[in-house]
Amino acid sequence: MSASFRSTAAQLSYGIVGLGLMGGSLAKAFRASIVNACGAQGRIFACDRSAAVLVQAQTEGVIDGGWQPEAVHEMLALCDVVYICLYPQATRQFLLDNASFFKETAIITDIAGVKSIVADGLSGVFASGADFIPGHPMAGSEKEGYAHSSAQIFYGRNYILMPQPENSPAHIAFLKNLVTEIGFSRIIETSVETHDRKIAFTSQLCHVIASALVASAEDCHITEFGGGSYEDLTRIAMINAPLWTELFLENRDMLLSQIDAFRAELDSLSGYIKSGDAEQLMNALENVRERRSAMNRLETSA
Amino acid sequence: MSASFRSTAAQLSYGIVGLGLMGGSLAKAFRASIVNACGAQGRIFACDRSAAVLVQAQTEGVIDGGWQPEAVHEMLALCDVVYICLYPQATRQFLLDNASFFKETAIITDIAGVKSIVADGLSGVFASGADFIPGHPMAGSEKEGYAHSSAQIFYGRNYILMPQPENSPAHIAFLKNLVTEIGFSRIIETSVETHDRKIAFTSQLCHVIASALVASAEDCHITEFGGGSYEDLTRIAMINAPLWTELFLENRDMLLSQIDAFRAELDSLSGYIKSGDAEQLMNALENVRERRSAMNRLETSA
């Protein structure tokens, strides 16, 4: 990253709305990489329902000041960059409720895992000139809350940005530099609709499958018979139920379509197994191996 | 492990039939932990179709001698412990073809991932007194062959032993010591039937799911949108098609029953999503989280 980006970014004030796993991790990453002790003029602020979390983060030196939600407009008035780290519906509601409180030059972004319900129809809401650029950092943990946050979770991960027609190119470039600086290794720019379709597959379908796999275990001692596969497939089943209920339902049509596509392939494989058709089964598995290898090759060459 | 086990084990000769990923890893682990250079009288031998692999393993100091399949009886005559590391059908065929060539005191075991087709009806085959104890090391890799073998893959893994009524308790105890010495951390003793039912779930079903998930991806660029979940769920889809075709078909009824149970849970979750029933969906996900936590707790206390 350029030295000029670093020196600019270090002078700015960052506001994190929601200091949970993701908000906390972003705050720690900004502190570690952007606004650190070496003479920086910038500040990191946060808003959270929990006064205890704000006190903890300030005591740890992660944030320079904290606000509870009823006073968030005081924080927004100070922030050049605002990261909204709430659940999807709450993210949209926050944007609508606080549209007039952002700085006129603010860059606003979010982390919600579904995007059309967050971002559609917001054009013109920010009359002041503040710029909302929807985003989705493809990082996380099966552990929740500020207590599990870490600046390390972003390293080598994908970041999806969904720039809107009204966004300033300079603001988009700034965000790309910012997330690169904290460790993301690949930034994909796409539309809200493409995001929701792809994420229905790579993220939501995987969580549905992991959940069904845990639900169908005959008992909870099953991992005595595990060799790594079951553990890998169900790590994400330590699921945050309220969040994922919202993500599944707010991307319902896309997700159901991906579930149907998966079920068709499952039916096809189980059909070959049922009929004992070794040749068809072997061909299908060879194709799977070839596709998975191609995915690896594309990753390696990315 | 006791010093007396170590000194006994170091004097024995070990034969590995099939020097692929698993056979090669076992040979390397025996060399590292059991029969090493410190004055040991024991030997590690191997049989493989590939003369090149035998030469490589001997050059690397992993084995002390190699035989191709047509001369395997020469090797078996020397071996106190024989590990058959072949595909399931080939394992059974090897046992039947070579029953009279094992030493009278030999401990014989295997690694096949389905067991009833390997082990059923073998009682009395080994007239000489050789003792076949079916086993399944729950370790492996999505990479194949001796070139990817490693003594490290067994560390912290589960080992399933399926002792038969005719097996000598001393031989069973020896095998348990042996696999503990090379890194396995938990040994489960169970029946062939229970093994096949549990493994249909923890291993085969997971491979079917991972394969269906790769097959249903809309393209091979999908990992651009990955955040770890998809990668975790499909690592094992780099599948060895001939081996898994055999494993799936030879455990067909058990596997189909597990696929049905999984599909019922998938249908249930997708039904809640389709109907938009947030309360039922949230309850189901809370149950999943509780079950997955219970599995973790049982693991930790094991």
Image: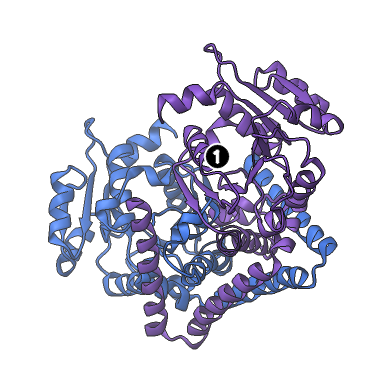
Chain colours: A blue, B purple
Check the residue under mark 1 and report the chain it is in.
Answer: B
Q: Nearer the viewer, residue B118 or A146?
A: B118
Q: Nearer the viewer, residue B233 or B258?
A: B258
| Disc 1 secondary structure class | helix
Judge whether residue A75 can be spotted in this image.
yes
Q: Residues within 10 Å of mark 1 (few under 14, many from 20)?
A: some
- Reply above or below: B250 against A64: below
Numbered-mark total: 1
Give the x, y percent position of residue B265. Answer: 52, 77
In the image: residue A63, left or right of residue B113: left
Judge whether residue A168 can be spotted in this image.
no
Give the x, y percent position of residue B34. Answer: 53, 25
Residue, x 34% and y 69% (percent of image)? A91
Give the x, y percent position of residue B271. Answer: 52, 84
Give the x, y percent position of residue A195. Answer: 55, 64
Q: Quadrant of residue B14?
A: top right
The N terminus of chain A lies in which quarter of the figure?
A: top left
Which residue lies under the disc numbered 1?
B171
In the image: residue A83, left or right of residue B89: left
Q: What residue type is disc 1 on? A: His
Q: Quadrant of residue A59?
A: top left
Residue at the outermost top position: B39
Residue at the outermost right position: B70
